[in-house]
Amino acid sequence: MLATGTRYETLFLVAPLCVALAVEGRWRMGVALGALAWVPVVAYGWISVAHGAHFLPNSLLLKGAMPPTGGSARAWGNFLTLGWKAWMLQTPQLFSLSMLVLVLCAWSMRKGAWGRAEEHAERESGRRWTVLAGGIWLVATWAHLQFAATGWFYRYEAYLVGLGVAGCGFGAWAWWRSEEERGIGTRTVGCLLVLFLVGPLGIRARAAQQDFLPAGHHIYRQQYQLGRFLAEAYGEEVRVALNDLGAVSFFTDGKILDLYGLGTKEVLDAKRAGHLDSQEISRLLLNKGITVVVVYDVWAAPLLPGWLEPVCKWTVPDGYWKKTVTFYGAGPSRAADLQKKLRAFAPKLPPGVEVVYVNEAGFQRNADLE
């Protein structure tokens, strides 16, 4: 329950696990596990709908792959091949683990994972576990790649990588201890095969190590400072629209209009319906009484209404993501108040953050569209 309540992707593991329990004759446990796993999902959905939101979280509706509604055969064909394309082209670490899992499962089946001899019970139990766990992992991996997202700083598929490595380690240990596979040649070939297949994992680990430090610096110098500024300058009275709500929602308890849609249902619905434009954004800004807008111009500028007043840009050196955020005021008086607050906060910014105010040299509206 805790796992599915935290990450809905856990259901991709629970479903094949329930089937495996049924195959093993433990169907009562499988039914109980499946029912318990759905409890937090249904509870969240019921509460969410009761408060006027969707049954599923906005993040799943925005980032997940949903079946086409009333789509053509071509649309359905593209949807049904998403998982296989992601498996082979976008996630080499999962593809290599999948190949290793298949090799270990094939070896376990060939050696008789479901044998009956009592003297080989312990050995057969390990092989049987390898086949069942491998099958569960393969089904869960396909389901994740078909319906959920990957990438985004390694976090979405991290649980699959961790479970895959652990499962392959168990299967490889069972193979290593096998009396039938103790020849030097067999073990040498097997070790070389394992090293070849897990190579993409090493590449992924190295890339992660290289990315974490600059990404952390970027968040600290940009989003963290943005959250601090709004909390200090406006407090709980802040009414802000932005396209990255993480740090701001952590530091403040004010009103936030999420222009990306993760935290605002109206934006999500407009995006899914295909009519999120400057007119719709203008309506939302006015209806919610937004006074400050902070966005990446590279993403949001085409959607912003012309009556917003640009005030200032913060640019971080060597940014990992988008380097520049632009501040807008909802009208001249609010823009003037915003600029006053920004000037008071500027000395608290980390070294290297470039601050340029409107009408100063170097300030060009939408100049960072790259």
Image (cartoon, rainbow, N blue to C red):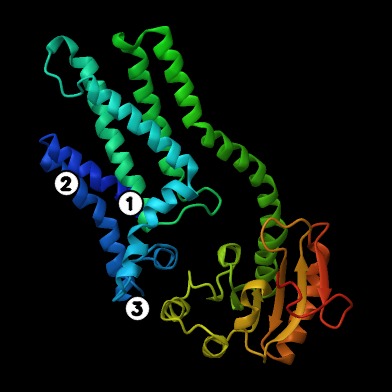
Q: Is residue 322 positioned above or below 23 on the image?
A: below
Question: Observer-nearest residue: 364 or 108?
Answer: 108
Q: Are marks 2 and 1 in contact (CB under 8 Å)?
A: no
Q: Are marks 3 and 2 in contact (CB under 8 Å)?
A: no
Task: Quadrant for the C terminus, please.
Answer: bottom right
Place of residue 103 in the rendered image (x, y in percent of width and height, measured from the top left) = 34, 29
Task: Tell me the CA gap for discs 3 and 2.
Answer: 31 Å
Q: SS for tag 2?
A: helix
Q: Give residue 290's mark.
A: none
Is 358 left, or right, of 192 in this rendering?
right
Question: Observer-nearest residue: 4 or 50?
Answer: 4
Q: SS for tag 1?
A: helix
Which residue is denoted by mark 3 in the rendering? 52
Report the mark closest to the observer, 1 or 3.
1
Please tell me in which quadrant of the rendered image residue 63 appears. bottom left
> Tag 2: residue type?
Ala
